[in-house]
Image (cartoon, coloured by chain):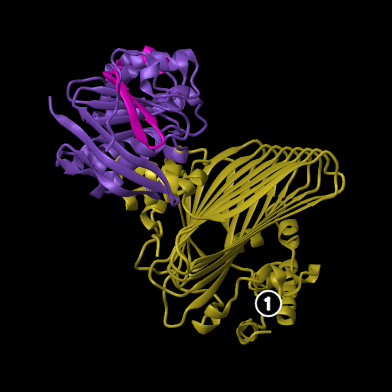
Amino acid sequence: MSTMLKITDLHATVAGKEILKGLNLELEAGEIHAIMGPNGAGKSTLGYILAGREGYEVTQGEVMFNGKNLLEMEPEERACEGVFLAFQYPVEIPGVNNTYFLRAALNAQRKYRGEEALDSVGFLRLVREKLEILHIGDELLHRAVNEGFSGGEKKRNEIFQMAVLEPTLAILDETDSGLDIDALKTVAEGVNRLRSKDRGMIVVTHYQRLLDYIIPDKVHVLADGRLVATGGADLALKLEEQGYAWLEDGGIATLDVDSATETANP
Amino acid sequence: MSDFSTQLASALPEDLGSGPEWVKTLRQGGVQNFRAHGLPTRKDEAWKYTGLGAMGQNGVQLATGSRSLVSEVSNPKPLAESGCQVDMLDGQYLEQIGNPQPGLTVLPLADALQQGIAGLQNLLESLPGPASGAGSSFGFSALNTATLESGVVVHVAAGTDAGRLSLTWSTRGTDAPLLFNSRVCLILEPGATLELVEQFESLDDNANGSNIVMQANVEENAVLHHVRFQQESEKAALITRTEVTQQADSEYTYYGFDLGGGLVRHDVHTYLLGSGAKSGINGAYLLDGNRHVDNHAKVDHMAPGGLSDQYFRGVAGGSGRAVFNTAVCVHPGADETEARQSNANILLSARAVVHTKPELEIYADEVIASHGATVGQLDELAVFYLRSRGLNEQEARQLLTTAFCQSVSDRLADPVLGGVISQRMMDVMPHAG
C-alpha cells in the first residue's frame, strides 16, 4: 500500500476566519477514514479545501495527492485526477438533465486522461451497470440535476455520480445528514460496493450511525481545526455514547478506548 | 415627430391601393393616424427604453409597392418538419410548400381581401391603433395598416386539428435598407387547433427592418400554439405586434426565442374575453454585442376563471440591452382568475443592462396572482459543483446559462422542436465579458 493523500500542517481561512489550524492526515489506497467532530470543527471546510472551492484560502501547509500538489490545481483538474466530493448539500441545477451532465463530466475526465469520449450508447450501458451495482432505479436519470429531489434522492445521486466517475479519492461530506434509516442503508450499501483496494475514502460525519454500515479503517476526531484523536472503529461508538464533552474535560484518556491515541500536533 | 417618422410618412403612397372599399378606408385611417402621430418615441412610457435612432441612422426607407420575388437565396430551412410551409420574402408572400390539410386555408393577404374570408374584416378592423388613445406608441400599427397589402391569412375550420404550419420570414440586403410591413391574420373557429412556427432569419448581413402585425381570433375551445424564433442579422430591426382575442375555454401559448437582431421589439397582447381561457406567454432572449431586445407582454383578463402564465428568461452579455415588461390586468368581473408572471435574467458582463418591470392590476375577486422579476449572476456554487465533477469553468458557465434558457424551450410540447431550438441557443450563447 502506498500513501495516496498526505495532508501536512494544513491551515485555512474562510472569510478571514481561521478554520483549519494545522491538520495532518495520511490516507492509503484502499482505506476508509472517518472524520468525526462537533459542529463548527472544520469538517466541511476540509472537504471544500480538497475539492478546491473558491473562498477557502489555504494559508499554510500542503496537500499531496498521489505525489502531486493538489492545492495548485483547479477544481476540474482535481476531479480529473480522481478527487470526488460528495456534497453535504448537493446543488440543484434546474434545466440540466442529470444524464447529460454526468456524461459531460465523465467525458471531460476521459479527455483529460487521453481516453476516447463515450457516446450515448456506451454511456447508457455504463449507467445501467452502475445502477445495478448500487441497486437503485433509473428514475433520477431523466430529471434535472438534484432539482426537486428529496434529501435521500440527492444523496443517492451523489453516490451514483461517484460510481460512474470512479474517483481515486472520495470525500463524503455528511452524506448521512437528513436521511432516514432506509435511505441511510441504501447510501451506505452503495458506498460499500464502491470500496476497492485502489480507492481511498474520507467519510465526514457528525454521528456514528453511518459507521454502523460503513466500517472505517480509522476514525479521526476533528476539533477546533485539528485532528485531536485517532482510533479504530470502536472510537466512533465511544463518541456516540459520550459525545464530545471530553474535548474540554481532560482529553482522550477519559474516553477509555483501547485503540485511540491522542494525535500528535506540531 | 422624428425626422425618421416624417420621412416614412412622406413615403406613404397617396393611392389607397386595390381591394374592397372597407380596406381602402382602413388604409386611409392608418395613413391619417401615422401622419398625425408618427413612430413611438422615448416619451411614450412603453418605449422609454427602446429608441429607434438606429433605424434612422441606417437610412432605412419605407418599402412600397410590390417588389420582385426572384431570389437567388432560398429561405432558411424550417426548424422542424411541418405539413405545410409558407415562405415570406421581404414581407411578401413568396410561396407555399406542401398542402394544407382539409379545414386549413392559407392565403396571401391580398387574395384573401379579394375573396373575403369569414371574420377577416372584423379582425382587421379591430386592431388597436393611435386613435384608441395610445398616441404614437401604436405608430407601427398605424404604419402597418396604412400599407396593408402583404401578408398571410390562415383560417382553421371548426373542430379541425390543422397540425403545424411553418412560416419562415427572411429579408435580403439592397443598396438602401428597407422597412417591410406585413400582416398575419389567424382565425381559429371553435374547437380548431393550430401550431404556428414562425422563423425569422436574415439571408445576409443586412440592416433591413420588418414591421409585422399578427392578429389572431381564437374561438371557443380552440387552441393556438405560436412559436416565434428569430436569428436576424446584427443590424436588422424586427418589430412585431401580436394581438390575440380569446373566447371561452380557448388556449393561446406563445414561445418567443430571440437569438439575433440589432433592434428587436415584440408586443404580445392577449384578451381573455371568454371564461376559462388560458394564455401562456413564454420567451427567452440571448444578447451580446450591442443588441437590443425589448419584450412587452400584456394579458387582459376580461372574463372569470382565466389563467395566464408569463414566463421569460434572459441572458445578457457584452453591451446587450434587454427590456422586459409584463402586465396583467384583471378587469371587474374576471373573478377566480389566476395570473403568474416570472422573469429572471442573468447578466454576464458589467456593461450589459436589463430593465424588467412586472405590472399587475386587479379589479376582481378571488384572484390568485404571483409575480417575480430577478436580475443576477450565475450561481457560483453551481459553477463549483459542475467543476468539481470535471467540467472546466467555461463549460460549466455555458451549461448553466443554456439550461437557464432551456427552461423555456422545455415548455414546448414537441421535444424535437425544443431540442433544435435549445441547440441553436447553445450555439449563440453569449460569453462573459
At horizontal 42% and vertical 29% (from top left) the residue drawn is A142
Q: Position of residue A196 (x, y in %)?
A: 21, 20
Three-letter code, disc 1 = Leu
Chain letter, colour yellow: B
Towards the viewer: B15 or B114: B15
Q: Which residues are magenta?
A: A209-232
**Which quadrant of the figure has residue B140?**
bottom right
B312 w.r.t. A206: above or below: below
Q: Position of residue A154 (x, y in %)?
A: 45, 28
Residue B186, percent from left and from top: 63, 52
Magenta stretch contains residue A223? yes
Please tell me which residue is depicted at 39% across the width and 13% down the height of the picture. A237
Q: Nearer the viewer, residue A33 or B228?
A: A33
In the picture, the quarter occupied by the N terminus of chain A is top left
Q: Crowdedness of circle 1 by 10 Å Cα count: few (<14), some, many (20+)? A: some
Q: Residue furthest left?
A: A1
Residue B129 is one of the magenta-drawn residues:
no
User: Who is closer to the viewer here, B368 or B14?
Assistant: B368
In the figure, the shade used to draw chain A is purple
What quarter of the picture does the C terminus of chain A occupy?
top left
Q: Based on the displayed image, in which of its 4 quarters is residue B369 positioned? A: top right
Q: Position of residue A181 (x, y in %)?
A: 47, 13
In percent of the image, x 16 and y 31: which residue is there?
A3
**Label 1 belongs to which residue?**
B16
